[in-house]
Image (cartoon, rainbow, N blue to C red):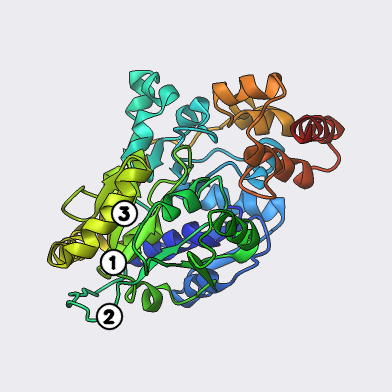
Amino acid sequence: MPHMGGGVGKAMVSLVDGTKACVQHAFILLESPENRQFLDRILDSGCEVMIQPSGKFINSLISKADIVQLEWWNHPALFSFLCSRYLPPFRMLAWCHVSGLHSPVIPAGLVGLAECFIFTSRCSLQAENIRELTKQDRDRLGVVSSGVGFSGVRYDRQEKSSKLCFGYMGSLNFSKLHPDFIEYLSCVTLNDFHVQIWGDESYKEPLLAQCRESGRAGLISFRGYTVDPETVLKDIDIFVYLLNPTHYGTAENVLLEAMSVGAVPIVINNPAESILVEDGKTGLIVRNKSEFSAAISWLYENQQEMRRMSENASRMVAQKYTPEVMGDTMNGYYDRVLSCTKNQKDFSAVLGHSSYEWFMACRHPKEIERIHLGRPDRVLITEDTKGSLKHFADYFPEDLDLKQKLSNLTCRDEH
């Protein structure tokens, strides 16, 4: 796997906890970690972690392994690792951490290389190219959520004499956060409506500028990144989780964490969120700005109903989204993979031979058309990470074609 940060790091910790009785895990990281929060927890559990080991060592480990588990998302390091070296025969279970509904799509050929290809949300089964798979490849598919709530906790919210606390936690990148996030918030007419924002503050100034432009300068406040989300989330009454309709997420770990401690979510009717939130029972699902404003007002005026949804949400996560449930489900797929014979896998044949081909392998057909027309989605081209064209160009600086393509598209976008 490329790294052990963010949601994938939490997923690895949960998987180890849920399978430790019968599985011995060893991890290979293709990059040096920037954040050791989850890495240290993995090490404390007794697992071996190797950071950027030699190719010879990796091949030796692959040869000895019963199963090679590929943590899949469109990170340039994964393409380079899989397509630029000889790998010995092995059995592969791929755990996919993007939905594939929009860019980045899941290369259909990758499914055929895996003995089991596991999605982190059943919403991925709706992806166009996944629906078109042969029956043989569809039989390789499965679903294991990578999201869990906080273990062993249940919070029963009591009626508050003070005003309600509204909050958002997560990515502020507009490939994930709804680009009209501030417009949604500014539609709320409550005098004391204010949203606390927890996350990386890289996008702080653009969001604050949008607040000022809307005439609601005090609409949000930034609280920074926290390594203790449980403490923060248990004080939030209403979790304002408004994501881009074309976002790449699946298990939405922070949403499950918020629900597990009784924060009532309001989400947009995107596929991934709609699977996790049952409208009117564990939260509210809205389709537009007016419905969002109405939902906020309704919760404010019906706090007994809000407490009912809070209890339902906490109970649902405690039953369905735990390391134990994750481990039990994944162990079933491990047994299936073990029944297969190790074999050689040609990743270049399905992903491409050059870094530009690797980038394009995960583009949705509609985005490929926009790229050829010179009208690409700016975020998916110029974002520093998230598998963008810039991310690939920075990772492979020797690829002049990739660099030139980025320059051309960036110049067109600016004009």
Q: Residues within 10 Å of mark 1 (few under 14, many from 20)?
A: many
Residue tagged 3? 266
First in sequence, mark 2 or 1: give its number: 2
Question: Helix, strand, or loop for circle 2?
Answer: loop
Image height of 26 relative to 229, above or below: above
Q: CA distance from mark 1 to mark 3?
A: 10 Å
Q: Amino acid at mark 2?
A: Ser
Q: Amino acid at mark 1?
A: Ala
Question: Helix, strand, or loop for circle 3?
Answer: strand
Please provide percent x and percent y for residue 413. 74, 33
Q: Which of these two is toward me, 20 or 152?
A: 152
Query: Any mark on residue 263, and which?
Result: 1
Query: Any mark on residue 13, and which?
Result: none
Q: Which of these two is toward me, 168 or 119?
A: 168
Residue 385 in view? yes
Please provide percent x and percent y for residue 299. 22, 60
| Foreground: disc 2 or disc 1 | 2
Name which quarter of the figure residue 24 lies in: bottom left
Please provide percent x and percent y for residue 157. 20, 75
Query: Any mark on residue 162, and which?
Result: 2
